[in-house]
Image (spheres, rainbow, N blue to C red):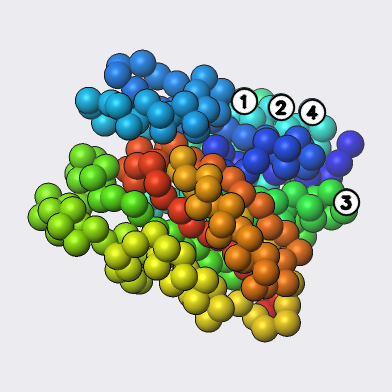
Amino acid sequence: MKKVAVVTDTTACIPQEQVARYDIEIVPVQLIFEDKTYRDGIDISAAEFYARLRKASRPPTTASSSPELYLEAFQKASQSAEGILCITEPSRFSAMYDSASVAKEMAAKTLPDMNIAVLDGTTAAAGQGLVALAAAREAAKGHDLNEVKETAENVMARVNLFATLDTLHYLVKSGRVPQAAALVNTILQIKPIFTLNHADARTVALPRTIKSAMKRILKLMERNVVKGEPLHAAVMHADALDNAIFLRNRIASQFNCSELFITEFTPVMGVHTGPGLLGVAFYSESS
């Protein structure tokens, strides 16, 4: 039996082969599409979701994972581990941290001997995935819960995330930005680049094309890596694989990557950003 199991959710955008390799427990987030509920990654794939989103007359919505779903994941993880580290999205963006915390309290009765730590994230999407993978690798080395949690917190403090949107159309439909902003986006064809660091989301650049956006993202990476240190990076995309491959290849040629992979952007966030999103999460091995 291993000392620590890692639990996170589908918003972390971890490829299935990595989930299986490190035995990470994934809690599905729920998508509500035309009055039907789907479990992200189980009942509907990212590719299926974005294909349907392009044709949808009504925007889909999301529902945070319930405490019961987290408790189920804790119970499964407890069968092969002495302790559990659960990593969630930032609590300021969703109720998943609260759900996981309630599940931890519930587990005190059903799993009284299980030590569970719930970590409130400061990054999301592939950034959260990189944190979970770093924690899972540490757990695979046989380290205890405190050591695995310390590794996750250390990586979390160093992760950067930059992404560009192909359109503001879906943000407007979800009520996240004013209609006027979408009008400007349509007229100017701006591809805004945003960052999500330390639970703070903000726009950092307003390029006019995806090609320019990719160049700007690479420059932002150059400013935020530690020179000479190996880089861990995850390129994420929402139904934009060709652009993701191009960006991945540029990153591979420009940086010393010890970890580099492409992953699909979680539909749970894609509800608001729409298809076409392209981004990268990364951190230097030490700082």
Q: Position of residue 236 (x, y in %)?
A: 53, 50
- Residues at badges 3 and 1 in contact (C-beta under 8 Å)? no
How far apart, in angstroms, are the residues tagged by discs 4 and 2?
Answer: 6 Å
Indicate the amino acid at tag 4: Gln
Left or right side of 136 for 9: left
Q: Which mark is residue 142?
A: 3
| Residue pointed to by mark 4 | 79
**Badge count:** 4
Confirm whether residue 45 shows in the render.
Answer: yes
Instruction: Looking at this view, name the residue that lies furthest to the bottom.
Output: 227
Query: Camera-side residue: 258 or 27?
Result: 258
Residue 72's label in the rendered image is: 1
**Amino acid under disc 3:** Gly
Q: Is residue 139 left or right of residue 264?
A: right
Contact check, label 4 and label 2, Cβ < 8 Å: yes
The secondary structure type at the circle numbered 3 is: loop
Callout 2 touching callout 1 (CB < 8 Å): yes
As helix, strand or loop, the secondary structure at mark 4 comes to loop
Q: Which three-letter amino acid code belongs to the residue tagged 1?
A: Glu
262 or 34, nearer to the observer: 262
Image position of 17 with respect to 58: above or below: below
Of the residues shown, which amino acid type is indicated by label 2?
Lys
Which quadrant of the figure contains the C terminus? bottom right
Q: Tag on residue 76?
A: 2
Q: Residue at x 35, y 71 (%)?
A: 204
Disc 2/disc 3 C-alpha distance (Å):
19 Å
First reached walking from the N terminus: tag 4 or tag 1? 1
Residue 211 in picture, x, y percent from top left: 42, 63
